[in-house]
Image (cartoon, helix red, strand yellow):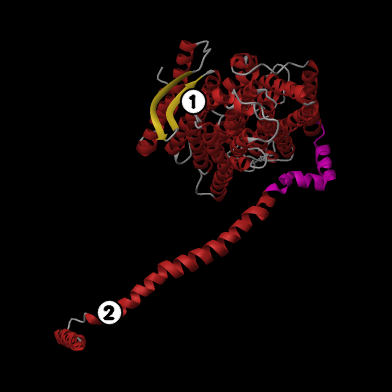
């Protein structure tokens, strides 16, 4: 089936635009950048139509990558139902975002570079989801991290983007250190990194009663997921990553890369099923992250920051799902989230584009007349993420919360309340942007068709995507443990509706009351507005001590004192001193040379006479 062609197309796009894009017209760059992703999407559709219904896993081996002792790692690609879902998301949603970028980035510098980076990201993301072993997955994992750094820092002439890119890169390296240790422990435990062989080996092992080897292994891998998928304690990079161009926020930081941790756990479900203690931690971390992100989202005024914390929160729901064993529900929410969250970010980008770069909600208002398409499509996305019945997010979120209720009712209640908070802050942003009087300084206008058509397509999927039976499609991989619970469904939907009503009351009908409540909250509002001072805590407890240690010990002590002073510069001074002493031997004067020759001869005669006489 030539699976290698799927990632190969965007790789070609990266190479061509990256090497020669500076000399190409924008039209040619568009054809290459968008066309290669379209080719991958079409090829995926053709391939899946030939393999339908894809009841078994299909893999292809290309070459042996590493052969060392017992360890054999091949460049092998895998296609099963889970891979198929991810391929459709990466290439399908990715294609829409590439098309949208034509309009959004039209007047930006580095146009060819932007599309080259997007193509490179698509290549690595496809490698990640198609890998049949843990090491090749890690290649894609690190590759998308690299592309995230490049795209967050895209506006490299400004301080905030470059600092945000560094933050994203460094925070993810912390998580990936744990991920690397997890890979090493996998090799030690199973003597292989191939998913199929690990699954076969672990199937004969008992389920761990406590924290054994499998629990440690899975938690180390989960450490990488907390970085890549922005979970506590490594979530802090994602909100700052909004310094990237908005299409990047939609593609990398909403629809694809940040969901890699959820995909990884679903792919290795056979390991997590044998480590229930680790799964409980995954579920609790996901639930806490959902609450944290939702509460912070209430107070943010930057429209992209609101949706960024929404992403953190929704990723928490996904980890709650996979943590309670509802893997298909977690992947289902991953898919619907790709639709409505990409739409939220692209809708925000449409507003920013129509307001000449304005992102502050306090400088918006009344935009529904000037931007009717953005108004309607962003409204659909907001209803979807709020879990309103009939919209895509309702079905996937209900599947997670029903499974959470079956696992532990307290998890369900916290998740349901968080759903209400989500509806409140998302519609707060929606009402502030589109209702009331215009408070800005620009002349708002609707975005061009190249941007609004992707909005309309994503709106259709945000509305109807919940009817795609992903849990049923994945039932061959994961048992259907997500029993629908009518009570859970009614309660979670009710919280969402209540959240919307409260937001409408405060920000449409009684906006003065919202300001009064903010002032009455006082210190609590300040605490949440400043994101619980987590960044400040990290700065004081981690960053500054490390900077001080690096400056005083590593730089002044080791680098300047030992290396420069003792080794490099010290050796140089020694050689220079000997050189000064010996340079007098070569003065260029024949008389001096004759004197030294005579002195040397006399010295030799004296030594010979001294030792010869003693014999």
Residue behind mark 1: 130
Q: Is residue 468 magenta?
A: no
The residue lying at 68 percent from left, 26 percent from top is 321
Q: Is residue 511 magenta?
A: yes
Circles 2 and 1 in contact, beta carbons < 8 Å: no
Looking at the picture, does residue 284 appear above or below residue 469? below
- Specify whether 545 is left or right of 504: left
- Specify whether 109 is left or right of 417: left
Classify mark 1: helix, strand or loop.
helix
The residue segment tinted magenta is 509-534
- Which residue is the extreme one toward the right? 520
Q: Is residue 366 visible?
A: no
Question: Of callouts 2 and 1, which one flags the residue occurring earlier in the amino acid sequence?
Answer: 1
Residue 577, how many percent across, how many down? 35, 77
Q: Quadrant of the N terminus?
A: top left
Residue 177, how many percent across, how many down? 56, 43
Q: Which mark is residue 582?
A: 2
């Amino acid at each position: 089936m030539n699976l290698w062609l799927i990632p190969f197309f965007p790789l070609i796009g990266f190479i061509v635009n990256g090497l020669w894009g500076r000399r190409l017209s924008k039209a040619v760059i568009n054809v290459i950048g968008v066309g290669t992703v379209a080719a991958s999407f079409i090829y995926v559709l053709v391939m899946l139509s030939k393999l339908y219904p894809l009841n078994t896993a299909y893999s292809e081996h290309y070459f042996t990558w590493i052969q060392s002792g017992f360890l054999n790692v091949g460049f092998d690609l895998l296609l099963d139902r889970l891979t198929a879902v991810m391929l459709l998301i990466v290439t399908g949603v990715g294609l829409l975002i590439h098309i949208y970028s034509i309009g959004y980035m039209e007047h930006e510098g580095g146009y060819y570079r932007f599309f080259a980076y997007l193509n490179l990201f698509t290549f690595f993301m496809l490698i990640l989801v198609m890998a049949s072993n843990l090491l090749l997955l890690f290649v894609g994992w690190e590759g998308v991290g690299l592309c995230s750094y490049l795209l967050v820092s895209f506006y490299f002439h400004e301080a905030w983007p470059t600092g945000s890119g560094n933050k994203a890169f460094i925070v993810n390296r912390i998580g990936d250190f744990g991920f690397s240790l997890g890979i090493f422990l996998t090799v030690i435990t199973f003597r292989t990194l191939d998913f199929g062989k690990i699954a076969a080996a672990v199937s004969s092992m008992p389920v761990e009663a406590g924290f054994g080897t499998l629990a440690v292994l899975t938690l180390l891998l989960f450490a990488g997921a907390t970085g890549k998928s922005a979970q506590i304690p490594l979530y802090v990079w994602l909100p700052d990553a909004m310094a990237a161009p908005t299409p990047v926020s939609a593609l990398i930081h909403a629809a694809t890369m940040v969901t890699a941790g959820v995909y990884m756990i679903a792919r290795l479900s056979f390991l997590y099923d044998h480590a229930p203690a680790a799964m409980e931690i995954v579920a609790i971390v996901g639930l806490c992250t959902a609450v944290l992100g939702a509460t912070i989202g209430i107070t943010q005024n930057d429209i992209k920051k609101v949706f960024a914390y929404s992403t953190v929160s929704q990723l928490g729901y996904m980890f709650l799902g996979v943590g309670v064993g509802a893997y298909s529900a977690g992947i289902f929410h991953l898919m619907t989230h790709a639709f409505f969250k990409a739409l939220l970010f692209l809708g925000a980008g449409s507003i920013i584009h129509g307001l000449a770069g304005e992102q502050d909600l306090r400088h918006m208002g009344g935009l529904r007349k000037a931007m009717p398409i953005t108004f309607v499509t962003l409204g659909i996305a907001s209803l979807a993420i709020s879990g309103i019945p009939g919209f895509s997010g309702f079905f996937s979120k209900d599947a997670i919360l029903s499974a959470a209720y079956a696992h532990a009712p307290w998890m369900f209640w916290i998740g349901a309340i968080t759903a209400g908070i989500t509806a409140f802050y998302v519609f707060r942003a929606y009402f502030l942007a589109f209702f009331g009087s215009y408070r800005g300084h620009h002349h708002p206008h609707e975005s061009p068709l190249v941007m609004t058509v992707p909005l309309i397509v994503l709106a259709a999927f945000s509305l109807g995507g919940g009817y795609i039976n992903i849990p049923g499609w994945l039932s061959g991989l994961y048992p259907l443990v997500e029993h629908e619970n009518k009570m859970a469904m009614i309660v979670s939907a009710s919280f969402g509706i209540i959240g919307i009503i409260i937001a409408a009351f405060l920000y449409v009908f009684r906006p003065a009351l919202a300001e009064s409540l903010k002032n009455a909250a006082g210190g609590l509002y300040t605490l949440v507005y400043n994101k619980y001072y987590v960044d400040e805590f990290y700065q004081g407890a981690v960053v500054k001590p490390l900077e001080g240690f690096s400056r005083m010990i590593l730089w002044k002590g080791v680098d300047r004192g030992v290396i420069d002073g003792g080794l490099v510069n010290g050796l140089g001074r020694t050689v220079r001193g000997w050189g000064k002493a010996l340079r007098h031997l070569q003065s260029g004067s024949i008389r001096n040379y004759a004197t030294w020759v005579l002195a040397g001869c006399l010295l030799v005669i004296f030594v010979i006479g001294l030792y010869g006489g003693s014999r």
